[in-house]
Image (cartoon, grey):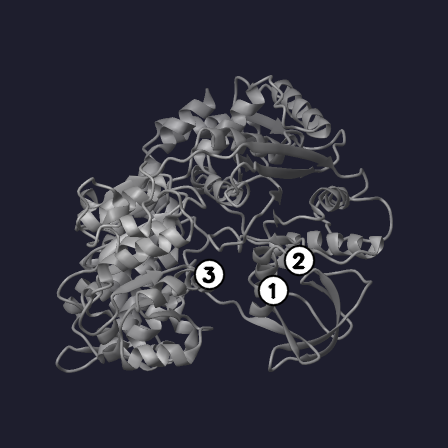
Amino acid sequence: MKAIQAPGQMTSSPHSASDGMAFDLLHPEIRRWIWEQNWSELRDVQDKTIRAVLEGTGDTLVAAATAAGKTEAAFLPVLTRIAEHEGGGLSALYVGPLKALINDQFRRLEPLCERLEIPVVRWHGDAPTGAKAKVLRDPSGIALITPESIEALLVRKPDAARRLFGSLEFIVIDELHAFLHGPRGLHLASLLRRIDRLSAKSARRVGLSATIGDLAIAARWLNWQCAEGVQIIEAKSDSPELKLQIRGYEEPADVDFFDIVETDEPPVRALDEIASHMFESLRGSNNLVFGGSRKMVEAVTDRLQRRSEQHGIPNEFFAHHGSLSRHARHEVEARLKQGELPTTAVATTTLELGIDLGSVVSVAQVGASRSLASLRQRLGRSGRRRGMPAILRIYCRAPYLLPESGLLDRLRLDLVQAVASIRLLVERFVEPPEADPALVTVALHQTLSIIAAQGGAYAETLYEAVCGGGPLSALSRSDYVELLRAMAAHDPALLEQAPDRTILLGPEGERLTTSRDFYAIFPTDQEWRLVAGDRFLGTIPLFNQVGPGSILLFAGRRWRVETVDDPGKVLQVVQHRKGKVPLFADQAAEPVHDRLAAEMRNVLLDDALPAYLDAEARRMLVEARKAFRESGLEGCHLVSEGDDVHVLTWCGSKMNALLALAFLSAGVKAWSHDVGITLDDISLEEARSLLKHIATSPPVTSQALADFVESFEVAKYDTYAPISLLRRLWARENDVSVQSLPEMARLLAE
């Protein structure tokens, strides 16, 4: 790549480059800014994206590794293009999934925007109101915004939204992979269509992501009508050296594996040993530890902070999860970014996305990765400085094995899954997004939103606005009419119809749309607010059993409940050093993909011992392979254990759940796990006979299996939807997978 020229050598026009250099296409002031940053050259992703945006006219998808310069790749050409924008309204919209990410990008963009005299504003619930009010009065420049704030503008200030969004030239969607699945992705897709309808010409979209399994799927999300017109830029970059270790820990014989609360009494739990290794390995530098659940995050942080106290040194270990106050989370993020004090953040998934955390030396996690996308995202946090390796430690706990221990315990599945995930990481596998069950909830929500903004609408107009394109088009007209009728039939009604057939909000629709909770499509649990003196600490779910004298573990510290304000849902607490702790309830496990489950079987079939395993992990893997072979699992999939039968499919969570439903439909109790299902109170012969029946009888249908699903109400507003519609959509989404059950059953029975 050609070196960047000094300012005196620049061409006078940003579009007069004769030698084809992307640098020469940029606005003169941007080129001057680049020179002042001492950049010797544009990175590969920046060069390609600048050309795509400034020389093209369509949408652009940018996939590149973390810290590859994607933000600058998008905004340098976008700012070049909008610098001469005339007319009212915003020129560009940046949509990010997190307030913290928006704040971080604002700090990066503000100096350059000031030089170009382009206004830039943060727009979310915690952003300064004065700056937002100024933009409402005189809309121009760039807004950095969350989907929920777009929703609030469309509902509460529809006229202002039209002025703001009516002449947009660009919409930049950051961390695009976070929107490819889940209700927020469906929600944002609908919001972007509504923004497009506010102007005569749709804004060009630029999607940014570091972790996308199938770029064609991402391109289709970005431009549903013309995915083939999306220019895909997949930047290749040199990955840093990876230093890796998987460490194994077995619980003592007399310890409950699920008890992770630290006590001062022996025996020492596996998590105590893990914390001791973390303390020695991470102290004195900046690191990230991912604990999975809030329960694990608090248990690990508590152990690390107590070790700091025992050694008489300043604490440098801090919890980070969604229940902590915004102030507490920002303190941890600021410490990491500033890099002046050694800091290790112990987090759930809250630090996976692209908030700039500075130079993180290493990443650790307790338990195996269930998602390769998450693992890649986490690992991308380490090794961001040139010449520095990426460091990953995975700590695997396992129960103590007794003669009566079950097969699933003896297979050491957490350790095997960790090894399998590393193999797939090397192969660069990333899970493609799955269909999301929140389709009806988002359609219902957007219907209410549009009516609230417009005052009323005809059914056909609503269908076109909500389901006329994008992922919500999976709802047919008849599906949508059924949903509207259910919303009108609810008591109290969400919708009403005027004599001229205009659909209006009913009493319940009015109540929902005027609530602050309406703007977010994800459910917000009822919670206790924790207060120490006059300081707000954060929240815990209401299902935690608390009362005066109860001990809580929160933000890595122990607190005693002094008073309980039940109507206000406030707990007044004081710091406390001792006591048995009731922790957060466990969160639902992330699903495992078929490819990861299949690779776990390959790990057990193999004989090689990876060099990155410590001595205990090697011992545990040898032990697991021995159990695998002694159980005959090299050549079969069924194993009898007492009154149960394990059917090891080595498929992912979705297929296992469907196979379990097939057995339930035959009257057999079944529960699914990561690598198969377990059947209760059945013989090996009966299990094999039922598998043959599934394989050879008239095929099991998805509609029939739907009758055995315990609950279809999984998303925020599903309780307002007709069960018949939810059941039918479930059957439709799972039909292809259900059709493959007979062949799976045949192979399992052989």
| Secondary element at image label 2 | strand
Q: Nearer the viewer, residue 402 or 129?
A: 129
Tell me the number on the disc at residue 507. none
**Residue 218 visible somewhere in the drawing:** no
State the separation of the CA atoms marked 3 and 1: 14 Å
Residue extending furthest toward the right: 265
The amino acid beneath tag 3 is: Asp
Q: Is residue 426 left or right of residue 251?
A: left
Task: Looking at the image, tell me whether mark 2 or mark 3 is earlier in sequence order.
Answer: 3
Image coordinates for residue 227, horizontal then vertical, percent: 21, 45
Residue for badge 3: 104
Image coordinates for residue 487, horizontal then vertical, percent: 30, 71
Disc number lying in front (1 or 2): 1
State the separation of the CA atoms marked 2 and 3: 20 Å
| Secondary element at image label 3 | helix
Residue drawn 35% across and 81% down? 133
Q: Is residue 268 left or right of residue 331?
A: right
Q: Nearer the viewer, residue 294 or 535?
A: 535
Task: Looking at the image, tell me whether mark 3 or mark 1 is earlier in sequence order.
Answer: 3
Image coordinates for residue 262, horizontal then vertical, percent: 78, 52
Residue drawn 31% across and 45% down? 5
Residue drawn 58% across and 26% down? 639
Residue for badge 1: 331
Res. 153 image quadrant: bottom left
Image coordinates for residue 377, horizontal then vertical, percent: 48, 44
Task: Looking at the image, tell me whether mark 1 or mark 2 is earlier in sequence order.
Answer: 2
State the separation of the CA atoms marked 1 and 2: 10 Å
Residue for badge 2: 318
| Secondary element at image label 1 | helix
Asked if labels 3 and 2 touch by Cβ distance under 8 angstroms, the answer is no
Res. 134 image quadrant: bottom left
